[in-house]
Amino acid sequence: MNGIVRSALRATALRGVLSSSCSSNSGGQSVRALWNVCGRRQAAEIVPLVSSLELHDLRARRCYSRSHTKAEKELVEFLAEEIVAEKKAQKLKMIPTTLEGFSVSLNGAEVNLEKKDGTDTIHISFNVNHTVDADAEEEMNPTSDNVEIGEMKSKPNFTVDIVRGNQTLGFTCSFNNQSGASGADDNYNDIFGIDEITLYEGEHSDKVYSVAGEIIDGYLYDLLMNYLEEKGISNEFAEKLIDLSTCYEHTAYVSLLEGLSKFTSGK
C-alpha cells in the first residue's frame, strides 16, 4: 500500500514539474525599434506573437524545457517577438541593386557602389557597423513624461574613389551633425563633408600622403564639393545613401536576431 502511495506522490510531483516548466515567461518591450518615431512602446502596446495557447505545441515545449536552461528559454521567446516587431518595422524587404546609376553590391557589413563616368570609374564604399543613431531634429522637452526620439538612421562614413587610368583621387567623407558646409561659403547646406583627400598611383598604402579637409583652403574645399556633385555625389544622393544604409543595416540586424535565436535554441 505504501508503494502505491509513493508512486502516486511521484506522479503528482512530475505533473507539477512539467506544468511549471511549460509556463510562458515571454513579454517585455522591444529594446530597439529603429524606425518607430514614437520611441519605446510599453509591453501592452506590442502585438503578441500568437493569439492563443492553441498555437503552441505542448509536447515540443516540454521537450525544450528539459534540454535548455531557463535563460535560453526566455531569450528564445523574447527573440521571437522581437523579430516579428522588427520585420513589421522594415521599410524595404529587398535591398535595391542600383542607386542613381551606381550598381550596388553587398558583402557582410560592407556596401560597395560603382559606376562608369566617361573615362573615370567611381567607387563608393562604406560599412554599416556602429552607424545607427537617433535623428534628433526636434528639441526634447525635459518636463515632458513622454520623451519622443527621432527616427533611427544609419549615417556611415564613406569613401569616394575616382579612378582614371592608374591614378586614384580619393575622398573620405562623413555626414554632418548639423547641415552646413565646412568651406568658404556659409550659404551652402551640405549634409556631408570631406574629411580627407588623397591622390595616388597604383594601390593605396600608408605611405600615400593625405590631407584633412578642415585645414585646406576654404575656396578649394568648396570647389572639391562642387566636383563631387558633378560626379553624382550630391546632397540628394547622400540622402538616398542614408536610406540605403539604414535599410541594409536594419536587414542585417534582423538577420542577427534570427541567427541568435537559432543558435540559442540549438536549431
Image: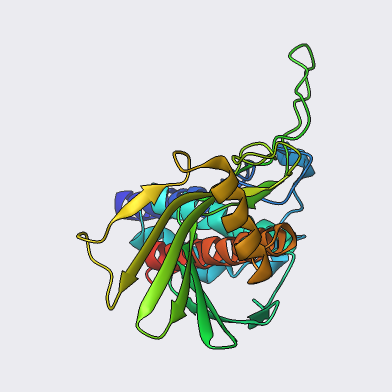
Q: Is residue 140 above or below residue 174?
A: above
Q: Is residue 135 above or below residue 211?
A: above
Residue, x 56% and y 41% (percent of image)? 218
Q: Of 110 and 10, which appears nearest the observer?
A: 110
Q: Of 89 and 97, which appears nearest the observer?
A: 97
The answer to whether any part of residue 18 appears in the image is: no
Residue, x 51% and y 42% (percent of image)? 217
Q: Position of residue 20 (x, y in %)?
A: 50, 47
Total residue callouts: 0
Q: Position of residue 211 (x, y in %)?
A: 37, 49
Answer with the quarter of the image where residue 226 lies.
Answer: bottom right
Residue, x 71% and y 66% (percent of image)? 54
Residue, x 36% and y 58% (percent of image)? 68
Q: Is residue 151 above or below residue 244?
A: above
Q: Of 235 and 155, which appears nearest the observer?
A: 235
Q: Position of residue 53 (x, y in %)?
A: 70, 60
Answer with the quarter of the image where residue 102 lies.
Answer: bottom right
Extreme residue toward the left, this view:
207
